[in-house]
Amino acid sequence: MKLILIALLGLTLTQAVFVKRSNDPSKAVFTQLEAMEEHELGRKLLDTIALQLNNKAPLGDIAKMLQQLRENLILNQQEADQKHAQDEVDCETEIYQYNRRIDFASNEITESTQEIQSLSAKVEQLTQDVEDKTVQLDILNEQETQIREQRAEDSENFKKFENETENVIEAVEVIIQRLSSIQPDQEVLAALTQLNKIGATNPILALMQVASTFSAEQLNNVINKLGEVSTQLTEALESARQTEIQAQLDFEALVIEIASQRESLSAAREDSQRQLQDNQQALDLQKKRKEDATDELNAASSGKEQKEAECNAWRTQYAEESEHRQQEISIIRQVEEILATKLSNVKVYLQERSSA
């Protein structure tokens, strides 16, 4: 037998270690057993069976051992199937939750982005409105300052004009009074003497000296003219006073109008400032909302990706282990079948195997 094996081995290196004659009826069994040698469990089973046979163990014990192994593998597969089914439920549930989080976060980002655009436009508009109203208030304040300064200047000029005009009217009245006391047919020495007491530079004295040379008709004309001047000055002064009164009334009305405009503008600016503050706070909240939603989207997407990778790893592991387990169950069934029907061939194979 050994010579035959050596001869056949020399013919081809691709054949199995335990090659049999082509017309050997045990070839099919040997081929099955040799195939089992390629699997770790198959080798261990053949080693165990060989040991049991060498120890003269009952065939029933070997069959019981194989049955126990097969049933354990089947039970393990059932447990693996149950765990895999539960894992799939867990994966589906968790991925569904991740998708819900992703959808919600995406919707939050979309809505907050729209709100941010709208609120940003409102904030910009309100900011400009507050600035415009501030400028208008500054203009009103400047206008009020200017009209107050102008009113003060006009009032001062009027008081000066009033004082000077009153002095002129008083002087004209004095002149008229003095001229009225002159009698052309009388000596004017007494009147000139009294006027001379006022001083040498007294214009009335000079006028009296000139007027003393007038005739009665000329003197009356001068007095009438001076009366007209006094009347005109008085009328002008009264007109100026009425103008001053009206100017003061107009000033006060303008100040009231400016105050009303200022109050209205101030109230409008305060309202715009409140709206600006409210919209700015709302804008900040929407920015925070978008930031939080972006973080949530990233976290959910990352979690989903990790979970999908984990589930795929479980599926791969389950498939590989199930395939490996099914191979082992198949090998055990083959061994059981061979032992039940071809025990003598197994013994021969194992003897040659041990002696090879």
Image (spheres, helix red, strand yellow):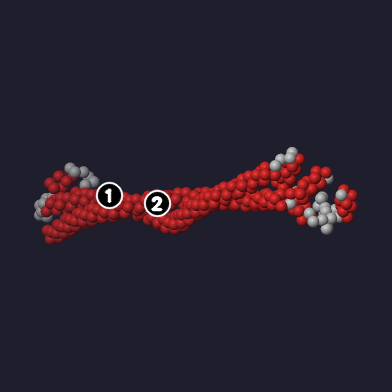
Q: Which is more foreground, mark 2 or mark 1?
A: 2
For residue 110, say whether it is visible.
yes
In the drawing, does residue 199 fall left or right of residue 312? left
Bin the neighbour count of mark 2 within 10 Å (Cα to Cα): few under 14, some 14-19, many 20 and up: some
In the drawing, does residue 42 fall left or right of residue 78? right
Q: Quadrant of residue 197?
A: top left
Q: Which amino acid does the dot numbered 2 rest on? A: Ala
In the rendered image, the vertical position of residue 239 relative to residue 189, given as above or below: below
Q: Which amino acid does the dot numbered 1 rest on? A: Ala
> Who comes first in sequence, dot 2 or dot 1?
1
For marks 2 and 1, give the CA distance. Answer: 50 Å
Bin the neighbour count of mark 1 within 10 Å (Cα to Cα): few under 14, some 14-19, many 20 and up: few
Asked if the residue at tag 1 contacts the one at tag 2, i.e. Cβ–Cβ closer than 8 Å, the answer is no
For residue 141, say whether it is visible.
no
Residue marked by disc 1: 152
Foreground: 220 or 45? Answer: 45
Q: Secondary structure at mark 2?
A: helix
Residue marked by disc 2: 282
Residue under the point 74% across and 45% down: 46
